[in-house]
Image: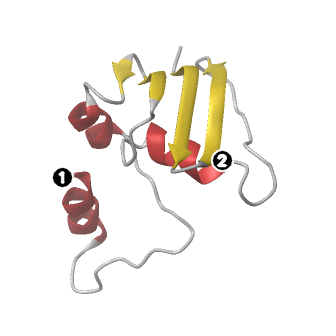
């Protein structure tokens, strides 16, 4: 499997963003994550991109654990949030290398 989430929970204080989320994405499958504002979509992608730690559960990307193997995952994926600015004085490759560290 390419992406796996098992019992992922994430809270922000008293606000629950994800509760026991479970899913898998196999090689060749394409999924869309949709939902209203506040449904946890951004939280999920930040966890998958190793930018945010889940409170509980296990998440893997291409077999690598998002907590334990975060450096390897960051080297192999890219994440571009909706509101984001690149450094204009760096090339695209330099921006990718900078944000992958």
Q: Are marks 2 and 1 in contact (CB under 8 Å)?
A: no
The quarter of the picture where residue 33 lies is top right
Q: How many marks?
A: 2
**Is 47 displayed left or right of 86 in the figure?**
right
Element type at mark 2 = loop
Element type at mark 1 = loop
Q: Badge 1 local density, few (<14 within 10 Å), some, or many (20+)? A: few
| Residue 57 rendering spot, x and y as whole percentages | 48, 21
Q: Residue at x 20, y 62 (%)?
A: 98
In the image, 75 versus 42, the foreground residue is 42
**Is 75 displayed left or right of 50 in the figure?**
left
| Residue 8 rendering spot, x and y as whole percentages | 55, 27
Task: Of the two numbered discs 2 and 1 on the same chain, state the one appearing first in sequence.
Answer: 2
Q: Residue at x 65, y 47 (%)?
A: 40
In the image, 53 versus 85, the foreground residue is 53
The quarter of the picture where residue 58 lies is top left
| Residue 101 rendering spot, x and y as whole percentages | 18, 52
In the image, 27 versus 55, the foreground residue is 55
| Residue 84 rendering spot, x and y as whole percentages | 45, 74
Q: Is residue 41 above or below residue 71?
A: below
Q: Which residue is mark 1?
A: 101
Q: CA distance from mark 2 to mark 1?
A: 25 Å
Q: Nearer the viewer, mark 2 or mark 1?
A: 2
Q: Is residue 74 above or below residue 30?
A: below
Which disc number belongs to residue 40? Answer: 2
The residue furthest bottom is 89
Q: Residue at x 42, y 21 (%)?
A: 62
**Is 69 displayed left or right of 3 in the figure?**
left
């Amino acid at each position: 499997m390419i992406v796996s989430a098992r019992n992922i929970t994430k809270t922000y204080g008293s606000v629950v963003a994800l509760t026991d989320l479970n899913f898998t994405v196999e090689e060749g499958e394409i999924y869309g994550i949709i939902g209203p504002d506040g449904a946890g979509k951004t939280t999920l992608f930040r966890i998958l991109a190793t930018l945010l730690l889940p409170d509980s559960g296990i998440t893997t990307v291409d077999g690598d654990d998002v907590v334990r193997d975060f450096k390897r995952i960051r080297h192999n994926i890219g994440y571009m949030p909706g509101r984001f600015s690149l450094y204009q004085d760096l090339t695209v490759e330099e921006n990718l290398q900078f944000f992958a560290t």
